[in-house]
């Protein structure tokens, strides 16, 4: 068995990367969370791969399409790049076991609190999950991280007085600035993570859609 050499910062999307606004799928409604770019630059400087793991029940419910989600995600990745960070991969689950419509009504192993997306990332990037960190804004995020064996799990509760221990199994933070200062302010790692040539979106079933920068701008390939 090959040695696990990489570590990741796992980020939920709605409520962590962007302000929670109930089924966001348009740029006009997508507001980046304060401190997210500083946090991601600091984590990347310490050798963490940036990996997004997001439930997208809005697709399952028919509120927006996968194509609309992918278009928004491509733009989001580009914005991270403009602010000095590279998203290694976006994993998303478009299914819901109760409220899904048509083929999206499914009890998927990828839907948090199940750990499927995190375990796929472990395989894809040879991750040491015990050295990795997950930030979510719901207990289902924390449960997924614990089920996968992520070493540090952080529940973001905006406005909480200070970073603190939760039930001794996870941390609670009141802002992304608190997370950055407490967990990502150490010296840079000597070892660098695997180089990522382009950010990718991980679709259901493991098919990847690359998002690459070209002379004509961002494009799905």
Image (spheres, rainbow, N blue to C red):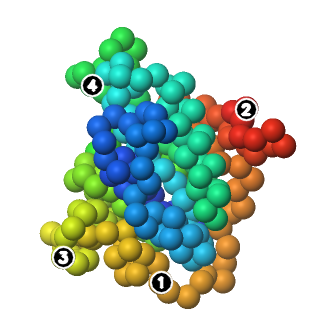
Q: Nearer the viewer, residue 92 or 206?
A: 92
Q: Residue shown at 44%/54% (left/top)?
A: 32
Left or right of 8, for residue 146: left
Q: Is residue 18 visible from the viewing direction of this image?
A: yes
**Could you tell me which residue is drawn at 84 percent across and 43 percent down?**
215
Q: Earlier in the sequence, mark 2 or mark 4?
A: 4
Q: What's the CA distance linking mark 3 and mark 2?
A: 44 Å
The residues bearing labels 1 and 3 have C-alpha atoms spaced at a distance of: 20 Å
Q: Residues within 10 Å of mark 3 (few under 14, many from 20)?
A: few
Residue closest to the eye, 22 or 87: 22
Please indicate, yes or no, whether residue 3 appears anywhere in the rendered image. no
Residue, disc 3: 161
Disc sitting over residue 20 in the figure: none
Residue 122 vertical placement versus 108 (above, below): below
- Please say if 193 is above or below 211: below
Side of 151 where 76 appears, left or right:
right
């Amino acid at each position: 068995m090959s040695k696990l050499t990489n570590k990741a910062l796992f980020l939920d999307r709605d409520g962590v990367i962007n302000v929670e606004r109930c089924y966001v799928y348009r740029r006009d409604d997508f507001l980046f969370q304060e401190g997210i770019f500083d946090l991601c630059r600091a984590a990347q400087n310490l050798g963490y791969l940036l990996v997004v793991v997001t439930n997208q029940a809005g697709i399952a419910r028919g509120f927006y399409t996968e194509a609309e989600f992918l278009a928004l995600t491509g733009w989001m990745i580009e914005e991270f790049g403009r602010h000095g960070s590279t998203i290694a991969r976006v994993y998303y689950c478009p299914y819901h076991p109760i409220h899904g419509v048509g083929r999206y009504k499914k009890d998927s192993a990828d839907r948090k609190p199940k750990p499927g997306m995190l375990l796929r990332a472990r395989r894809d990037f040879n991750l040491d999950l015990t050295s990795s960190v997950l930030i979510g804004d719901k207990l289902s995020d924390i449960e997924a991280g614990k089920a996968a064996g992520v070493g540090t799990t952080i529940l973001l509760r905006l406005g909480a007085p200070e970073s603190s221990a939760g039930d001794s199994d996870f941390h609670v933070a009141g802002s992304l600035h608190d997370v950055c200062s407490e967990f990502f302010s150490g010296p840079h790692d000597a070892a660098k993570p695997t180089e990522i040539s382009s950010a990718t979106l991980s679709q259901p079933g493991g098919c990847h859609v690359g998002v690459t920068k070209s002379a004509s701008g961002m494009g799905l390939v």
